[in-house]
Structure formats: structure tokens, C-alpha cells
Amino acid sequence: MPIYLDYNATTPLDRRVLEAMQPYLTGPYGNASSVHRYGRAARDAIEQARAQVAALVGARAEQVIFTSGATESNNLALQGGAVARGRERLLYGATEHPSVLETAEALARSGVAVETIAVTREGVVDWPAFEAQLAAAPVRWVALMRANNETGVIQDVARAAQLAHDAGARLHCDAVQAAGKIELDFNALGADCLSLSAHKFYGPKGVGALLKRADLELAPLLYGGGQERGLRGGTENLAAIVGFGRAAELALAELQARAARWRRLQQRLETGLRALPGTTIFGADAPRLPNTTQFALPGWHGEALLMALDRRGVAVSSGSACASGKGQPSHVLLAMGWPREIAFGAVRVSFGCESSEADVDRLLALLAELHAQVAAA
Ligand SMILES: Cc1ncc(COP(=O)(O)O)c(C=O)c1O
């Protein structure tokens, strides 16, 4: 049986989520904007999902804007915020997902002043440098992810939000990888808006949300029929939204149990990795997600190691799914100050609900074999 250990790239659809969605694929087919009974049934289902998604992050239902996924949510926050809030400086974490990085770079091409926020070798914000950036000139917008998709490193977003607010800036948080893995509280984080994506916690692909405080002004990316309070035109993807809601409900109910299991698997994996001489675990001393470990084996290129493991039936990632295959070392590890030759070696293992101790032991046995091959060469 092949073993899937790439749950940060995406998760399978939970059967209970599919069951919740199925009636909306074949049954109620109304448009949620219609006022007749068909439309009202669709609207009720969407509003229930909105409450379920809000509950996952301790927010209010009216703060949730449904989108096509977190790429759109991050674009809406940053592009929509830049349009509504003016063109002065945007600061964004150097280890953000490409949906933030590329948006920031596009904004820079259109004349917005953008700067990255440096991180330490452990992948957390370099606080003195960040404070100096905030003090140097007015900042309108800060983007900082809650947890990194490659290393799993968790950022102190509440501290960044406090500093940003004191400096008169707003803060957007990409919480895609944190949702369903660690506790998330929109209010405690202090973020002005926050992105979520259903397919990272057993929901369907192609649906996500941007949570937004009422007093934050955003301009829509898509104009249309005024759906989602005018911030996201387009007929809602009813079944996907229902699935997102159910996945959020399950993630909240099962969070502690899932996280405790992942933490045990992670410890087992990392104990085994430390026994392989010369192995690097990235962000090892930082707070990290319970399900994520990124490492490099000496003498192995990450892509080659990924393929060697794939041939032996184990699926891992050599960094973020979007970046793999580009032949570039992970921008996350370079930002953390790792030399290119070590960053090139990076492989990411991410656990999910189906992962077991037997999976970890199989992976460790293969890694020991591959490690020995290089040592013998
Ligand atoms: C941290 C992070 N942000 C954003 C995204 C994009 O999410 P989506 O696939 O919903 O567009 C991902 C997905 O890989 C991610 O890991």
C-alpha cells in the first residue's frame, strides 16, 4: 500500500463531509440569491456553513466571506486592501506562501512600496528588524502567516498585530496551515483579516474564506451580483460551501485528538531522523505545527529523495507543492539563512488523520537505507 505523507499539500475529502455535500449536488439546486423556496433552502445551507466556519476561529458568522480558496482570499486581502487603503508600504513575511509573495510583487509593479519582513534562522519574525521597519516610515498593511506550509513554524501573529496597530497599520493573516491543526482565535490573534482553505482540513478543493473585521475596508476583486456583501460577486458554490462548513465543524470537534496523535508521530519521526548523522531538521527549535517536519538528509537533493521515496511507495514533498519542480531551493529556507546546498536538500513530511506509526517506521527504514547509500558512496 502506498503511503501518503503530504497532507499540507492537500487532504482527502472526509466521508462525513462528502455525506453532507451530496444532497446539495443532487437535491436542492436553488440559487441562494433567489427569493423563492428553492433559493431560501440554498441560502439557509450557506448561512449554516458560514456559522460553522466562523466557529472554527471563534469569529462571528457575518465576518466570513466565502471565496474560491485561500489564493483568492490572500489576493482579496492584499489587493483589495491596497486599493481601499492607499498605496503606501506593505510589509510581508519573507516565508509567506506564493499567493502572498506574488500578490505583493504584483502590487510592487503597480507602484505600491513593499518590503519583506526578515525571519531568524528558526523561521520566526526578526522582531527588532520588524519594529525598525514599522518605525522608519508609515505602513498601511502587514501580511504574516500563522503557520508556514513548509516548515510548520508558527508565528506570533498577535504580537505582530499589536505592533502593526500601534503603528497605524492593518494586519492580514494567512491561517491556512494552522486551521484544524492548532487552536485559532480570530480575536486573540488581533488580525484584521484571515484566510482559510477547506481542502487543508478534509474539505473540498476550490473553496475557502476570508474573515474580515467590520471596520476594515476592502475593494472587491470580482464585481457582480453583490454576493458576499458585495465583496465577492458570483453565484455561490453551494455544495462546496456546505462541505467547508462540515469540515470546519469536524476540525473543531476533533482538534485536540488529531493534534495529540500528530505530535506523537512527529516525535517518533524526529527521533528517528536525529539518529541519522548529518540530518538537518528545519525550524527545529521554533514552535511548530504538530503534523509538519521539514528536513534534509546529507548528500541528497530534495527532488531526488522525493523521487526515491515515491518509487518505494511513500509520497512526501520537496517543499511547497507550488514551488517543487521549479529547480529552485525553497525561498522559505533561504529566507531563514540556510545555504543553498542545504536548502536544496529539503523534504517535507506532513501527517494527516490516516497517518500511523507504521507509516513513520516505514519511512524511517527507507530513509536509513537511502542515508547509508550516500554514506557508502
Ligand atoms: C499557507 C498557504 N496559503 C495559501 C495557500 C493556497 O490555498 P488554496 O489552495 O486554497 O488556494 C496554501 C496552499 O498550499 C498554503 O499552504
Image (tube, grey):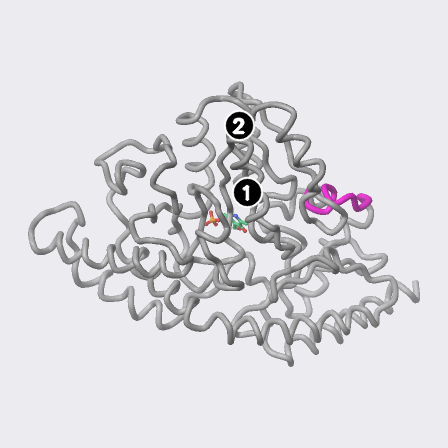
Instruction: Give me the C-alpha separation between circle 1 and circle 2.
Output: 27 Å
Q: Which residue is mark 2?
A: 106
Q: Residues within 10 Å of mark 1 (few under 14, many from 20)?
A: some
Indicate the secondary structure of the residue bearing disc 1. helix
The mark nearer the N terminus, 1 or 2, is: 2
Q: Residue at x 55, y 63 (%)?
A: 7
Above/below status of 196 relative to 263: above
Q: Amino acid at mark 2?
A: Ala
Q: Amino acid at mark 1?
A: Gln
Determine the image quadrant of residue 323.
top right
Whether disc 1's CB lies below 8 Å from ligand 1 is answered no
User: Can you tell which of label 1 and label 2 is closer to the viewer?
Assistant: 1
Q: Residues within 10 Å of mark 2 (few under 14, many from 20)?
A: some
Q: Which mark is residue 162?
A: 1
Above/below status of 361 relative to 138: below
Residue 49, position in %: x, y? 29, 59
Q: Main secondary structure of the magenta part?
A: helix
**Quadrant where the C terminus is found in the figure:** bottom right
Residue 31 appears left or right of 223: left
Q: Residue furthest right?
A: 376
Could you tell me if the residues under marks 1 and 2 are in contact, i.e. CB atoms within 8 Å? no
In this picture, which residue range is highlighted in magenta? Answer: 331-340
Residue 187 appears left or right of 294: left
Q: Residue at x 66, y 52 (%)?
A: 319
Residue 247, position in %: x, y? 38, 64
Indicate the secondary structure of the residue bearing disc 2. helix
Q: Residue at x 42, y 57 (%)?
A: 57
Q: Which mark is residue 54?
A: none
Determine the image quadrant of residue 3.
bottom right
Magenta region includes residue 334: yes
Above/below status of 189 relative to 82: below
